Image: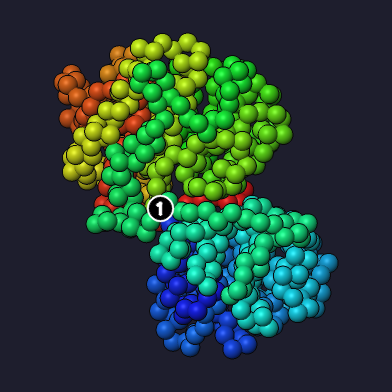
């Protein structure tokens, strides 16, 4: 949530800042602003609403210069107003900052340091601006370091001062910041997307680090204020990958990306001859793998539902007790974790605050901790002792699609790797891998039903409530499908395990309360059919996800989406796509902002 962009170099900075903010729109925001340093002065412009509003507003102001910072804000402290938008200043107009995160002790800082200071906003960030102003004595780096020593909370911070016109200070603790390295220029951003058009060479700040960026140099200091050497890394993604490529929305493009990117998740990570997976990032010897007696999936939202699929896969293939745990709740009890526990921290961004806190708790308790993330160089990738990049490419729609299926594929590969060590035969492993290699083409067959799924969304657009049902490994699929519908169309939708309907939710059923049932041909097919018949007896409309060739389902409903047959463990990779398309078309038909749904942010970097 929230986004930071900064630039220092020789180019006109305003177009770079506006373009960078547009690249960060997917993170979610409700206001935006820019500040530019030039000729011994700092000018700032802020607005409520979309970047277009800000872009129009700056046309009427003389904003020239080659050093500046900008921000998109998602309201936490204080309402959505121009005063609460970033950048923020102190009492004077010479110091300006942008900040992601939360200053937890801002009230205490106000009482202890800000007597006589006038605050213009209701934000915790403005308190930090005044605190830096108090410590400023001609050296912005030292002022920021002193101020942050008093802060309790999280921050991704950039700061400028009119008295030091060719300098930006950047700092990070719990909220990501990346520095792009160009020729005689530097970029700063919350992630790599704003700098893809300018450079692929980046430096990732770690927690506790502060960077002093000038035209001539980049210097980085750790929490002890000692200089540290950082490696320059190369971004794999290019700008074209982040474009819509002819699709109406990023989400639709990313749904259609799945047959391609799932190959990237699988490629080079299996051996058909041995019937196993080889994920080198696991960083565990066979002996260490044998020591694992329990597996825990830590994640939030869509990643949590991918973890639930991983639970089924690990228990089925590896024979290991496995649980998926909501990361935001994990550390607030006393979780049973020891040296025989393998913990997977799952996150598209690799920056999810709740998941980060949970994995740190797991590490303190001595577990093996591994990451499953999409963003290279993200905090989870750096703080775990190994793991795997899912290689989904940039995902710019707020609602996740291709990252989910790549997470599922990666976790299935991990389960197979452990399974072959424990109890899965070569033949079974080979059969699973061959079925997995067929998934990209079968995904295309699901996507080919796009128009039919759109017509179903049109048919059911007037219903205000619905239920999704699944059993076994398709129960997490129902949960993820319901989440997608809620996220982007704002239609109230709940998901239940099929057998749970008669334990309460069945009371909701009526002709105006449709049910979407995942009834593919697997070991629970007959059980699921019984659940559907119970629903039909209550006159509720039913949409069925069924396996190709199953003509019997037409006796139950005329609204059927057919999915190519595959192994039961792999069904989520296909069934999910149908639900993604249904949610997408429902949102479009209802006139919703598909890529940037209200109140949501792509990466939740505060608890």
Tell me where residue 5 appears, x and y as whole percent: 52, 67
x 45%, y 59%: residue: 200
From the viewer's perspective, is residue 135 above or below residue 320?
below
Q: Quadrant of residue 424?
A: top left
Foreground pick, 489 / 196: 196
* Residue 555 seen in render: no
Q: Give the image location of residue 585, x and y in percent.
A: 27, 47
| Residue 154 found in image quarter | bottom right
Answer above or below: position of 26 versus 503: below
**Position of 62 compared to 506: left or right?**
right
SS assignment at label 1: loop
Q: Is residue 338 left or right of residue 560?
A: right
Residue at 50 percent across and 79 percent down: it is 10
Residue 268 percent location from the top left of the image: 39, 32
Front residue of this view, candidates 64 and 303: 64
Farthest residue in the right direction?
Answer: 112
Identify the residue at horizontal 58%, vertical 81% (top origin). 37
**Label 1: which residue?**
237
Crowding near pointer 1: few (<14 within 10 Å), some, many (20+)?
some
Residue toward you, 118 or 184: 184
Q: Is residue 473 left or right of residue 607?
A: left
Q: Is residue 140 visible?
A: yes
Q: What number of labels is visible?
A: 1
Residue found at x 30% / y 22%? 434
């Amino acid at each position: 949530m929230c986004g930071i962009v900064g630039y220092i170099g020789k180019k006109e900075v305003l177009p770079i800042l506006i373009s960078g903010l547009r690249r960060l729109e997917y993170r979610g925001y409700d206001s935006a602003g820019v500040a530019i340093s030039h000729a011994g002065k700092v000018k700032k412009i802020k607005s409520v609403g979309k970047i277009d509003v800000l872009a129009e507003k700056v046309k009427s102001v003389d904003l020239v210069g080659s050093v500046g910072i900008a921000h998109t804000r998602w309201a936490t402290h204080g309402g959505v107003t121009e005063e609460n938008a970033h950048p923020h200043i102190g009492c004077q107009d010479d110091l300006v900052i942008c900040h992601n995160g939360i200053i937890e002790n801002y009230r205490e800082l106000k009482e202890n340091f800000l007597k006589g200071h006038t605050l213009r906003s209701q934000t915790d960030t403005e308190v930090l601006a005044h605190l830096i102003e108090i410590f400023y004595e001609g050296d912005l780096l030292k002022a920021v370091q002193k101020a942050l020593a008093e802060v309790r909370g999280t921050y991704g911070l950039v700061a400028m001062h009119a008295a030091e016109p060719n300098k930006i200070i950047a700092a990070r603790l719990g909220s990501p910041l990346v520095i792009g390295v160009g020729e005689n220029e530097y970029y700063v951003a919350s992630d790599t997307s704003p700098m893809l058009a300018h450079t692929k060479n980046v430096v990732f700040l770690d927690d506790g680090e502060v960077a002093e960026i000038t035209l001539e140099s980049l210097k980085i200091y750790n929490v002890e204020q000692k200089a540290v050497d950082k490696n320059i890394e190369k971004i794999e993604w290019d700008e074209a990958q982040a474009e819509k490529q002819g699709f109406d929305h990023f989400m639709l493009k990313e749904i259609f990306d799945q047959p391609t990117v799932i190959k990237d998740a699988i490629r080079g990570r299996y051996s058909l001859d041995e019937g196993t997976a080889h994920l080198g990032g696991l960083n565990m010897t066979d002996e260490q793998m044998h020591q694992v007696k329990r597996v825990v999936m830590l994640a939030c939202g869509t990643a949590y539902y991918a973890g639930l699929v991983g639970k089924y896969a690990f228990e089925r293939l590896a024979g290991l007790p496995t649980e998926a745990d909501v990361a935001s709740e994990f550390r607030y009890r006393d979780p049973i974790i020891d040296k025989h526990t393998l913990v997977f921290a799952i996150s598209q961004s690799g920056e999810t605050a709740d998941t980060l806190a949970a994995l740190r708790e797991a590490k303190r308790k001595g577990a093996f901790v591994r990451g499953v993330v999409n963003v290279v160089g993200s905090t989870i990738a750096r703080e775990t002792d190994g793991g795997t990049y899912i290689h989904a490419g940039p995902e710019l729609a707020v609602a996740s699609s291709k990252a989910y299926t790549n997470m599922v594929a990666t976790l299935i590969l991990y389960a197979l790797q452990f399974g072959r060590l424990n109890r899965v035969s070569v033949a079974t492993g080979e059969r699973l891998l061959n079925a997995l290699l067929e998934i990209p083409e079968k995904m295309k067959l699901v996507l080919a039903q796009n128009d039919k799924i759109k017509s179903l969304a049109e048919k059911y657009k007037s219903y205000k409530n619905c239920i999704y049902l699944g059993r076994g490994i398709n129960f997490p699929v129902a949960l993820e499908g319901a989440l997608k519908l809620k996220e982007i169309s704002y239609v109230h939708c709940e998901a239940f395990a099929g057998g749970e309907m008669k334990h309460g939710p069945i009371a909701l059923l009526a002709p105006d309360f449709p049910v979407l049932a995942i009834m593919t041909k697997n070991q629970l097919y007959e059980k699921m059919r019984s659940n559907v018949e119970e629903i039909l007896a209550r006159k509720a409309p039913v949409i069925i996800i069924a396996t190709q060739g199953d003509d019997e389902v037409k006796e139950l409903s005329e609204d059927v989406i057919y999915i190519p047959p595959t192994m039961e463990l792999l069904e989520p990779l296909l069934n999910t796509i149908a639900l993604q398309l249904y949610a997408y078309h429902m949102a479009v038909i209802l006139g919703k902002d598909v890529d940037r749904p209200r109140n949501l942010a792509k990466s939740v970097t505060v608890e």
